[in-house]
Structure formats: C-alpha cells, structure tokens
C-alpha cells in the first residue's frame, strides 16, 4: 500500500472507517480519488446520517464493511449523476426560453401588445441575459 494511501486512511476519524477503507483498497474495490471520495462520504454519513437534512446528528453507527462502503459510494455517485442530468435539462430549457424571448422581442406586433398591457419592462437579470447572448 502506497504511503499516501496509508496516510489518507490513517486520517479517518474512526478505527472502523480505517479498517473498511483498508479492506476496500486491498480488495481493489476502491482506489485513488474514489477511495478519498468514499472516505469523505462515510465520515459525512457518520456525522449526519444518510440524508442532508439539518437537525440532530446521528450517533449510532451501523457496522461497516467494504461492500457497504462501496454501495454507499455508488449510491452517492448515482445521486450526483441524476442531479447533473436534471441540471443539464433545466439549462437546456432555460436556453430555449431565452431564445424564444429574444425572437419574440424582435416582433413589432408583440412589442406593441406588451406596451398596451403595460408589460414592456423586463427584470434586470433577464434583460442582461437577452442582450449579452444576442
């Protein structure tokens, strides 16, 4: 085991965590950055529990194993992938909306309708986005 990995494992807060990280490394389940990410994840879960809710901290600790550590790491990675996918979808919809607004605001009839209804001003952030990307 390289010295840097041994040092990283030894810095874990709990002997159980150190043992599980060492097992995961020796069984080639987690290596490098994945091992570091798993260490952070398991320490967070020990402090807060499985969720990111605020409130009383969890003090009971379920026994750890290298497979449980790997499962928790994979669940966290999957959760982050879903979050990224949702974020990309939202970004695509926002770009679509900005382009639609940009085209609508070039139509004289639409601008006249907005002025008649006293809706001819835009929020500052939206106006900046429309003009900056145009």
Image (tube, rainbow, N blue to C red):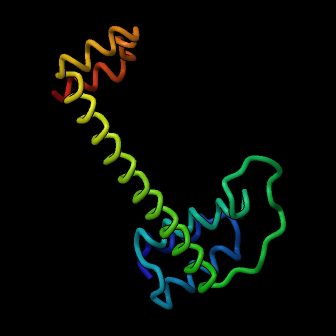
Image x and y of residue 110, in percent: 26, 20
- Looking at the picture, tell me which residue is in the foreground, 77 or 59: 77
Q: Is residue 122 above or below residue 58?
A: above
Can residue 111 be seen at all in this image of the molecule? Answer: yes
Residue drawn at point x = 19 percent, y = 30 percent: 103
Q: Quadrant of the C terminus?
A: top left
Can residue 8 be seen at all in this image of the molecule? Answer: no
- Looking at the picture, tell me which residue is in the foreground, 30 or 14: 30
Q: Is residue 115 above or below residue 130?
A: above
Q: Is residue 11 above or below residue 98?
A: below
Quarter of the figure with residue 123: top left
Residue drawn at point x = 68 percent, y = 59 percent: 51
Image x and y of residue 46, in percent: 72, 64
- Looking at the picture, tell me which residue is in the foreground, 49 or 120: 120
Q: Quadrant of the N terminus?
A: bottom left
Image x and y of residue 45, in percent: 68, 63
- Looking at the picture, tell me which residue is in the foreground, 32 or 91: 91
Q: How many marks?
A: 0
Image x and y of residue 12, in percent: 62, 66
């Amino acid at each position: 085991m390289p010295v840097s990995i041994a040092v990283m494992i030894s810095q874990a807060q709990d002997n159980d965590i150190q043992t599980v990280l060492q097992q995961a490394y020796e069984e080639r389940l987690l290596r490098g950055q994945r091992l570091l990410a798993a260490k952070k994840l398991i320490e967070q879960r020990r402090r807060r529990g499985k969720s990111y809710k605020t409130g009383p901290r969890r003090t009971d600790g379920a026994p750890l194993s290298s497979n449980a550590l790997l499962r928790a790491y994979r669940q966290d990675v999957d959760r982050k992938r879903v979050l990224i996918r949702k974020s990309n979808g939202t970004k695509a919809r926002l770009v679509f909306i900005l382009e639609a607004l940009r085209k609508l605001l070039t139509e004289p009839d639409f601008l006249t309708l907005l002025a008649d209804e006293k809706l001819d001003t835009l929020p500052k952030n939206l106006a900046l986005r429309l003009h900056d990307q145009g």
